[in-house]
Amino acid sequence: MKRRNALFLALLIAVLNLAAISPLPVYGRGVAAFLLFVPLLGFLATASVGMHRYSSWPEQALIALGAGYSVSVLLMLALAYLPGGLQPWQTLTAFDALALLLLLLSLRHPSSAQNEDMIPTPAPADPAARRWAWLGAATIILVAAFLRLPSLSYSEFQDDEVSVIWHSAEVIQGRADALFVHDKGPAEILLTTATYSTLDRLNEAAARFPFAIAGIVGLLALYWLGWRLFGPLAGWGAAMLLALDGYFVGFARIVQYQSVVLLMVVLVVGIVLKYVQRPQTRPVYLYFAALFLATGVLAHYEAALALVPAGYLALVALRHKDSSLRRGWTLAPPVLLGLAVFTAFYAPFSLHPRFAQTFSEITGNRIGGGFPYNNLADFFTRSVIYSSTYYFAAMTAGLIAALALVYRWVLPRPAFIVATVVLIGGFVLTFALPEWLSIGGQDTIWLFFALALAPPLLA
């Protein structure tokens, strides 16, 4: 990084500090604190390892934003473990010290870049392809922001939000086990505490803003991942579907973990996919993948499911003789980093009396008492609350059409016709007469979906 750029960033840190402690409205101060804690800190984290030298700036921006959330969560976790309460100066001092340290480290790396392209196909060197790439990203941002950012103070804190704010206040007041008496991961509390402890006050808009931004960035990461996997239209379509999805809109407008999980999981899979498509990708990306995976699990336990696609892609990458993953102990340090972040919270949590209750809640109420557990009826009921019934029906019809198209590609014509008829009939029975798919009182709907998804998975 050039010295003049470093001076500009140092000045920006000072300005954001002043804005955070100024007499501005709480929402304005909260946005200033967020800009310091997430985008700026994340950019410095990527610059400190020289990512700008071998990555396009859009890709670095996505990883930087993910890194900002991760680093903020970890720093606040360390502060939460300190004895006594949190004062505004303590939070600001901790973030400023880390930002300045990363800024100094970034001076070691020159600004020259090899510009390893973010999007491999079509070639970004094509001006038309670049225009479409930016147009696609712009439409996703506009639609997602329009649905997520306006009127974030639309209501007082409600339902699960109250629990997050309550525990955040307990962290600030110095309760030693404030993070352990929460039935979810601590990330949502820690992100809220970063703003709350800095401003010494909080309102609905300031608390919800970081989660709304995470929801928007998660969609851009999905656009990037879909483009890498199947092309620009697939990436744009997937991101736009979730931009309009009631679940994702609703959860991005409250103080909840879901948007953070989305962002972290997509970034993990996208980074590991990079090693499949570009075997010589530098190992530094693996550290961020491990950090994002661990942060996702600190947000909520379901983020661990990212290990399934990421692990598969890692095995594919290892099969390539030129893959950087095959060099010595390349995987060991990132894995240790991820485990260290994971155990920083879950090791002490496992010793707390609340752990057994939380474990029972997750394995019993959330997953189900025994296999197989069919929650389709509950999923349908919740989905048509958050989204239009027509949207849900269109999504279901789109899934059936996509599966039928794959059957047409991979199966002989007679088998294709039979499989499509069974597919449509199975979906109708699943929602209209699920008891018909029970054998001896045992629910077998899972078997229908396993068979329906087998052709595209095996193809």
Image (cartoon, helix red, strand yellow):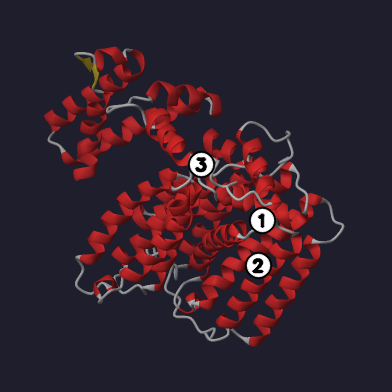
- Please determine whether, in this image, residue 431 is positioned above or below residue 62: above
Can residue 352 be seen here? The reply is yes
Query: Which residue type does callout 1 highlight?
Result: Ala
Q: Secondary structure at mark 1?
A: helix
Q: Which mark is residue 194?
A: 1
Indicate the position of residue 41 as horizontal and vertical percent values.
61, 67
Q: Secondary structure at mark 2?
A: helix
Q: In screen coordinates, is 25 left or right of 222?
A: right
Q: CA distance from mark 3 to mark 1?
A: 18 Å
Residue nearest the viewer, comparing 406 with 103: 103
Residue at the (56%, 81%) spot, across then down: 106
Q: Alpha-carbon neighbours of circle 2 within 10 Å: few (<14), some, or many (≥20)?
A: many
Q: Secondary structure at mark 3?
A: loop
Q: Alpha-carbon neighbours of circle 3 within 10 Å: few (<14), some, or many (≥20)?
A: many
Which residue is the site of mark 3?
184
Which residue is the site of mark 2?
95
Location of residue 144 by image quarter = top right
Q: Earlier in the sequence, mark 2 or mark 3?
A: 2
Indicate the position of residue 168 as horizontal and vertical percent values.
65, 47
Q: Do the residues bearing badges 2 and 1 touch, measured as CB atoms within 8 Å? A: yes
Residue at the (69%, 46%) spot, across then down: 169
- Please determine whether, in this image, residue 290 is positioned above or below residue 151: below
Indicate the position of residue 220 as horizontal and vertical percent values.
51, 54
Indicate the position of residue 84 as horizontal and vertical percent values.
68, 57
Query: Which residue type does callout 2 highlight?
Result: Phe
Q: Which mark is residue 88?
A: none
Q: Earlier in the sequence, mark 3 or mark 1?
A: 3
